Image (cartoon, rainbow, N blue to C red):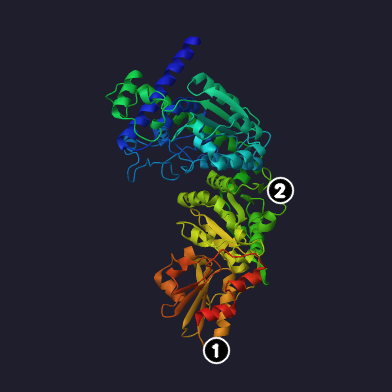
Amino acid sequence: MKEEKTMSNKMRQKMADSIRFLATDMVQRANSGHPGAPMGLADIAVVLSEHLNHNPKNPEWLNRDRLVFSGGHATGLIYSLYYLWGYGLEVEDLKNFRQLDSKTPGHPEFGHTKGIEITTGPLGQGIANAVGFSMASKFLGEQLNSDTAKVIDHNVYCLCGDGDLEEGISYEACSIAGHNKLDNLILIYDSNRITIEGSTDLSISENIRGRFESQNWDVQECDGHNFDEINLALSRAKTNIKPTIIIANTVIAKGAGILEGSHNSHGAPLGDEVIAKAKEDAGFDPTKKFFVEEDVMARFRCAIEKGDLLEREWLHSLKTLPLMEQNEALEVFLNPDFSRIEYPTFDKADATRNTNGKIMNAIAKALPNFLGGSADLSPSNKTNLNDMGVFPKGRNIYFGIREHAMASIVNAMALYGPLIPFSATFFVFSDYLKPAARLAALSGIQHFFIWTHDSIGVGEDGPTHQPIEHLSQFRALPNFYVWRPADGVENVQAWRVALEMKNSPSAFVCSRQNLSVLPRAVTGSARRGGYMISSDEDPSITLMASGSEVELALKVKAKLKSIGVKVNVASIPCYDLFIEQSESYIDSIIKPLTRKIAIEAARGLEWYRLADEVIGMDSFGASAPAEKLFEKFGFSVDAILEKIN
């Protein structure tokens, strides 16, 4: 047995060194990248390969283990593994590392490279994403599993480093994970004590073990280059009743000779001489590049047969489930029927945060996979799903005051599979989650952001709580659709469109104050981002606005009409969608020969794409009742008329 074990570890060493040299060859050929982390993690990656349940033939198998690389810079490791496991990458793809239009970009991108679960890169994001995958599995398991049959019972693994744990998002996410006892979450911490600037002693001295124990995690520690210790730590983690962090003590650039353990190996090629010497020391031919011996490849490619068998066994178990309800429930989750949604109607003035809450509850009643939560603001956001219970058995998630982790968690829940999740906070606090919103847009994730208290209409809380620049910021984000409805009817249209946008996030920016029910469209449709809500024959002025300012624009039109001035009013609930329309459609709503004026209680600079003039905010607001603020900052009929004149 001892001889078998030694031989096994000898093969593991050969496999790990193969990963190391693929990674170093990739970085050296590209003259760009990060060789240190892949070399340091190679031994862990080999043992993890033995534990991981996944199917290279079908990367979308629902009950696969999820593997997240929070240190997205370690792509030399990532692409080496996906090549070795048989996910379709070829040697030429490795040779084209970090090159234009290759399958191997500088950081992993979901949808670009087969097998990548989620786009990471900004440090710490992947930890929160892993928490999201785990939370998604726990919720779905509660809906589908029975005492005798487990439809969802996989693990979630996340590889992270010192930089990930220094980012604040990791504190938020790990706190949520510990609170919810996510026992299938295994965080592998590559503790090499090196960052770009040098030793971690320069910037951090906290007790990582104590930190995680205080957050209700199980903490294990191992030598990250000892195969047996790594294997034991992973085996124990899979039996835990709480989330696990494995502190793997490693050496950055393990095996790189003079650069082993040096911060200089983090983000720069090692050099041909260092690589050749490292290969020679490991018993590899230093003249061969991108080379993997047949026995090593065969060991890694076992993942194909193993994964295919696991999935076929899982599919067979679905057919023989003792309860038909489980199969039927899974089918409903996988194929949501939007036609079952009975949208509410609105016939009186109301805040769009209220109308939005009613719409969300209607969606939740029709779709069992619609869930989410707020950053401790559901009573103000109106996002509570009534009588829907609390996560994990129910659909209301209490994220606490953790906006950044919340958004990254929901990104992963949306990519997990058959879930339709949302997150919520005050619009001004979207600042805290902007990195996650950007990644949602970049990755094409259908994440519904609910942002309320949309303008100076917040009132007495003052300028710290009044979002001024935020509409402009998010309208500038590609593949991100900001809806600012002017009433409940537009709010319904916003949701109808957003639910159809499978590859884009949508934000619903809603008012605190009541907004009147508006007249309906004269020309066009809210589904196209903007429409004519009131028109005159041969107008000389076009007023355009979104949200609460549409009602103001209509009042300005009435005053102008009383003195003989003909005016069109356009409601633009989704600026992003409107500017995607054809030029002829835009011109039919915003008449080219009119004087075009945009009104918005925000910065509004993006409106100059459509307008000749913008009446917006030039300051940060103030603390006072909302009506006083609108008057003070020029959002009254008389003030608008004066500016027009």
- The reply to whether callout 1 and callout 2 are in contact (CB within 8 Å) is no
Considering every residue shown, the one lying at the far front of the view is: 202
Q: Give 239 or 380, whichever is nearer the viewer.
A: 380
Question: Is residue 212 shown left or right of residue 536?
Answer: right
User: Residue type at mark 1?
Assistant: Ile
Q: Is residue 566 above or below residue 576?
A: below
Whether residue 289 is visible here, answered yes or no, is yes
- Precedes in sequence: disc 1 or disc 2: 2
Question: Is residue 532 shown left or right of residue 278?
Answer: right
Residue 389 shows which numbered tag? 2
The residue that mark 1 highlights is 563
Where does residue 219 sit, x and y in percent of width and height? 61, 28
Dot 1 crowding, Cα within 10 Å, few <14, some 14–19, many 20+:
few
Splitting the image into 4 quarters, where does residue 286 fall?
top left
Q: Secondary structure at mark 2?
A: loop
Considering every residue shown, the one lying at the far right of the view is: 387
Q: Is residue 107 above or below residue 506?
A: above
Dot 2 crowding, Cα within 10 Å, few <14, some 14–19, many 20+:
few
Q: Give 15 or 365, whichever is nearer the viewer.
A: 15
Splitting the image into 4 quarters, where does residue 96 fall?
top left
Question: Is residue 36 shown left or right of residue 367?
Answer: left
Q: Residue at x 47, y 22 (%)?
A: 225
User: Residue type at mark 2?
Assistant: Gly
Q: Residue at x 68, y 58 (%)?
A: 380
Whether residue 161 is visible here, answered yes or no, is no
Where does residue 603 sit, x and y in percent of width and height? 51, 65
